[in-house]
Image: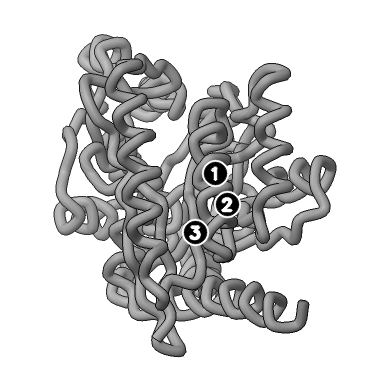
Amino acid sequence: MSKVILLAPTPPPIGGIAQWTVRMMNAKLEHGWQVEVVDEKILGVREVFGDKTKHDFKAEVIRCLTIWKNLRSALNDKEAKVVHSCIAANTMPVLREYICAVITKHHKRKFIIHFRCTVPNRVNGRLNKIVLKLLCGKSDCVMVLNKQSEAYIKKITNTPICLIPNFVSAEELNTGHIINKEIKRVVYVGGVIEAKGCLDIVEVAKEYPQIEFRLVGKSESKVRDAAFKVPNVVLVGALGQKEVQKELKLADVFIFLSYFSGEGFSNALAEAMANGLPCLVTDWAANKDMIENKGGEVVPIKDVEAVIKALKKMMSETVREKQSKFNLYKVKTKYNDKIVLNQYVECYERLLKRKKDE
């Protein structure tokens, strides 16, 4: 048996990385690989809503010391072969994980840094760029979620790069989605915040009063104030996974107008595709790569007029039927759990083979 140590946060809060951590904890990896999590859970009082993040410095110091201590303890297990660290690319996490890489190397194990964002959109300032380059150089492999991140990392390091998407489980695949003659319900799932394009969704809703726009997730006051003025916008609130799946099954279109700097590969968009939903998305992060202009419409960020026109195109039942079929095919062939988990295992085993060959 071989073990991979995940350096990643668990919920709460249920952000993109934490959601992925839960999926990995429940996953069955090939060739006897087992997953152990060294939890990087947020400590203390910290606002993690949208692009604005307030740190509790004392809590962050305690958090780092706890992570480093727990990592050392986990590495005492002889079965632990690889450390798989999952972070955004901003300065504080990069500095923390650089120390994790040093600890891992001291124990003569392999270290993977997995950027769970679009790296060039997240990196900010000279210090951030310097420590990012150091971390990539200290790693045995850099994992990224999209082509933009891959291109950026190639410019700063010779460390091998793996582009691996997020995954959805086979149970989430809904091949029985019904394409209605008319669009009656458009749904969004995620943080209901400005940076995720939710104010743009409210503006679009004004142009389509006959359609119900349902925003699923915790909302910020700015969006709430705008949404309350538009009768056909429904603030559903935060839901559990089963309830989210019900929302997706009842929807006609999934809308995702994000320009959030932390976006990498949207779990919510992948789940919508797995439900056979035609998708209306911004050209941001991995969105365009996922949809390929075949599974829906791709529009520029912050362009409400383009969204209004794109939704008009999607009124055709025939168009949406083709988009639905493409999305289901894409998930089956690219994003299903078995395919993606095998890519992780292949990466782990390549690193161990390289160690033997050296």
Return the disc, 2 or 3, that comes first in the chain's sequence.
Answer: 3
Position of residue 170 in the picture relative to residue 156 (left or right): left
Residue 311, position in %: x, y?
Answer: 50, 40
Q: Nearer the viewer, residue 269 or 213?
A: 269
From the image, tell me which residue sits under label 1: 264
Position of residue 166 in the picture relative to residue 129 (left or right): left
From the image, tell me which residue sits under label 3: 84
Residue contact between numbered discs 2 and 3, judged by CB atoms under 8 Å: no
* Foreground disc of the pair 1, 3: 3
The answer to whether 9 is drawn above or below residue 172 in the figure is above
Q: Secondary structure at mark 1?
A: loop
- What is the crowding at mark 3: few (fewer than 14 residues within 10 Å), some, or many (at least 20)? many
- The amino acid at mark 2 is Ile
- The amino acid at mark 3 is His
Q: Is residue 173 visible?
A: no
From the image, tell me which residue sits under label 2: 113
Residue drawn at 27 percent across, 18 percent down: 220
Measured Cα–Cα span from mark 1 to mark 2: 15 Å
- What is the crowding at mark 2: few (fewer than 14 residues within 10 Å), some, or many (at least 20)? many
